[in-house]
Amino acid sequence: MIAIPFIYFTLLALYLMRKNGGVDISVFLLLVYAFSAGCSILLDAMNLYDDNGVYERIPLSIEATISYCALLTLSILPFRKVNSMTLRRVDVQSEWWVDALAWVLIFTFFTTLLSTFANLDIAIHTDLKDVRDEVYANEESVRLTGFRWLLALPGTLFSQFSPVAIVLYFINIAQQRKTTLFNWLVLLSSFTPILSAILIAGRTQPIYWFLSFSLLYLVFRPMLDKAQRRQALLPFIVLGSVIAVFIGAVTIARFATERPGGDSGALDSVIAYSGQSFLNFNYFFCKYTAAEIHLDRIFPLTNYFIVHPGSTLTDYRDMIWSASGLFIGVFYTFLGDLLVDLGHGGMWVYVLLFSLISYLVCRTANREGTITLSRLLVILVLVLIPLQGIFYYSYYKVNVGYFVVGTLLFSGWLHYRSKHNEVKA
């Protein structure tokens, strides 16, 4: 039973890869979930339950397994319509506004760096396990006031626009719009959320960066010649090496001492980190029954500013704990969060609506090898749900809400400007 998701996602990915002539968005997503499912098999074989965020072993439910595979398939297949293998150009629509956004993101990175520099220095020179322990103890790792708070404001609003920065980076290279220095600055601006990850010794944001860059590289690869591919990958190798070292350091610091000899504990944590999603989903599918529907994490901005002003994720977790006795701070894919928030039926309704919306957005995205930037940004907002959802529903945060709303508004503005210019012409 435990091998079913791995076999299913692998075979489906291979089938679509052969049919599409390469790795496109849908194939990449399937391979990500196949990898996670493969790690689930290792986790089970090594009996890594009751540790590193993995719930106790229970019998696998055929209903949970079928739901897991079916819901993820519904979430992924609409992106086949983008047909990224045949894309050759992105219609930027408004050069001035796109460049303005790029400068905003670059400015955000440097203001965030300045506002957190002292704390970054402390985190780097502190045992990363101690840094993480402070986070688990609910101690604030950053306390900003006065001018430093004002300096951090751009980061509050734009820190999660990292995937947008990567899109702009590839557009600049593919269409030779800007200098190499500017392109490096744009890519560097995608590092803003990683600064926050360093402060809490977290691994998820750096992994999100790797996943986002890899997915978008596959989207833009058909538009790049060999020289442009080298140009695009060189800074990725440099910055990616820094991230890889950080992830390794965090893993060793937090987990290497938990097993005799050290190294096995770090390896176990990597396997558990990568493979727990399906097993934890099965646990909640079987053990959790939603007493009521909660939209706190589905609409984080509305909840934070109107419904429950100032509420935190800790408050929500405590509420679920008191009602069910289950701790929800684990990885069980975005489906697990939907199950907890909306119940079993609500999870299906959400995914069906998401699949329909994604299909409608993607079906006419590729027009004779050209996609508009406004459409590409909407697709980006949608595809990040299953991509980052390998761990959890990542759109629950207020600052991610700023990214979603801001990106959709910017996309709408580009579309409006494009139509307005067509009328004038």
Image (spheres, rainbow, N blue to C red):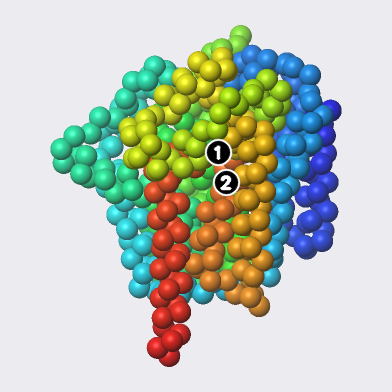
* 198 in relation to 388, above or below: above
Q: Residue at coordinates 55% horizontally, 24% vertically from top-left?
A: 328
In this rendering, the count of numbered labels is 2
Name the kind of residue labelled 2 in the image. Answer: Ile
Mark 1 residue crowding within 10 angstroms, few (<14) / some (14–19) / many (20+) = many
Q: Secondary structure at mark 2?
A: helix
Q: Residue at x 43, y 40 (%)?
A: 300
Quadrant of the frame with the N terminus: top right
Residue at point 82%, 34% (across, down): 4
Work out how far the residue at label 2 is from the one at label 1, CA to CA, in angstroms: 7 Å
First-in-chain label (2 vs 1): 2
Q: Which label was assigned to residue 385?
A: 2
Task: Kindly tell me whether residue 169 is visible in this rendering.
Answer: no
In-front residue for pair 312/229 = 312
Whole-percent x and y of residue 247? 51, 33
Towards the viewer: 90 or 125:
90
- In the image: residue 372, left or right of residue 33: left
Which is nearer the eye, 247 or 148?
A: 148
Marks 2/1 in contact by CB < 8 Å: the verdict is yes
The type of residue carrying mark 1 is: Tyr
Residue 257 position within the rendered picture, expressed as x and y whole percent measured from the top left: 54, 13
- Quick check: 300 above or below 260? below
Q: Position of residue 163 (x, y in %)?
A: 48, 53
Q: Residue at x 43, y 73 (%)?
A: 416
Residue 222 circle label: none
In the depicted structure, whether residue 380 falls above or below residue 367? above
Which numbered tag is attached to residue 393?
1
Q: Quadrant of residue 350?
A: top right
**Residue 147 vs residue 306, the one in the foreground:** 306
Residue 41, percent from left and from top: 77, 27
Query: Horizontally, is 62 left or right of 303 in the view?
Result: right
Q: What secondary structure is marked by label 1?
A: loop
